[in-house]
Image: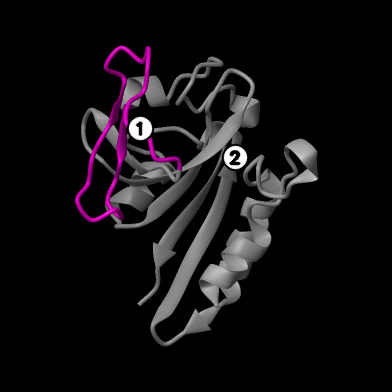
Amino acid sequence: MVIRHIYLYCLDTVGRNARFGIGGTSKYAVRLVGNWLNSYRMKSFAVRTEFIDGESVRIDRESKINQCLEQEGVVLCNMLLTKTEEHYLMASKADDKWIYCFDSYRRSFVRGMHKNVEVLNPEDGRSPNLRIRQTWFNQSVNERFCLGPIELRESLLIWRVS
């Protein structure tokens, strides 16, 4: 049921030749999925979500993103894929230098990122497959794999409820 609703609500943009899903997921869809997940409860599955935007979307010791990751939650982050194109990554952990993410676009390498973004090759296909240096991730400039300008920033925090 959860996977069905994620597919139903996400991949809602229209790309070339009027094809649905080609342009990815809209910001509206992320809010909708978060709202739906908050109300969906089963014995084996329940999560709590919180949508944040603007200045709240940052990486530092006091940030909501770090708190969520420290509590074994995940964060769906809206990033810049190009200077004008946005993309969602799922951050699953952080250390002092890196944010570890799962990127649905499978990449074998990332060009021109000067050791700020590295592709990982997990064995299981579910673990982080990308890591981004925190100092790069936090930038408010229009660069790839950054949170970007404050007014564009948004994230969905997701915690498992026991």
| Quadrant in the picture for the C terminus | bottom left
- The amino acid pointed to by label 1 is Asp
- Name, please, the residue furthest toward the front: 17
Residue at 60 percent of width and 33 percent of height: 54
How many C-alpha atoms fall within 10 Å of the one at disc 1: few (<14), some, or many (≥20)?
some
- Check disc 1 and report its element: helix, strand or loop: loop
Residue under label 1, please give it: 60
> In this orientation, which residue lies closer to the viewer: 24 or 155?
24
Q: Disc 2 versus disc 1: distance between alpha carbons?
A: 15 Å
Image point 66% across, 48% down: which residue? 21
The mark that comes first in sequence, 2 or 1, is: 2
Which percent across, then down, holds residue 59?
A: 39, 33
Give x and y (percent) for residue 5. 61, 69
90 relative position to 34: left or right: left
Quick check: is 127 in the magenta stretch? Answer: yes
Q: Is residue 114 magenta?
A: yes
Relative to 89, say whether 59 is above or below.
above
Q: For the point 30% across and 12% down, which residue is it?
A: 114
Q: Residues within 10 Å of mark 2 (few under 14, many from 20)?
A: some
Foreground pick, 60 / 149: 149
Name the mark on residue 53: 2
Query: Residue 12 in the image: x percent, y percent?
Result: 70, 51
User: Does 40 appear above or below 58?
Assistant: below
All told, the count of numbered labels is 2
Q: Residue furthest right?
A: 18
Residue numbers of the magenta segment: 105-133
Image coordinates of residue 43 in percent, x first then y, are 41, 87
| Residue type for callout 2 | Asp
Q: Quadrant of residue 115?
A: top left
Q: Nearer the viewer, residue 74 or 129?
A: 129
Q: Mark number for residue 134?
A: none
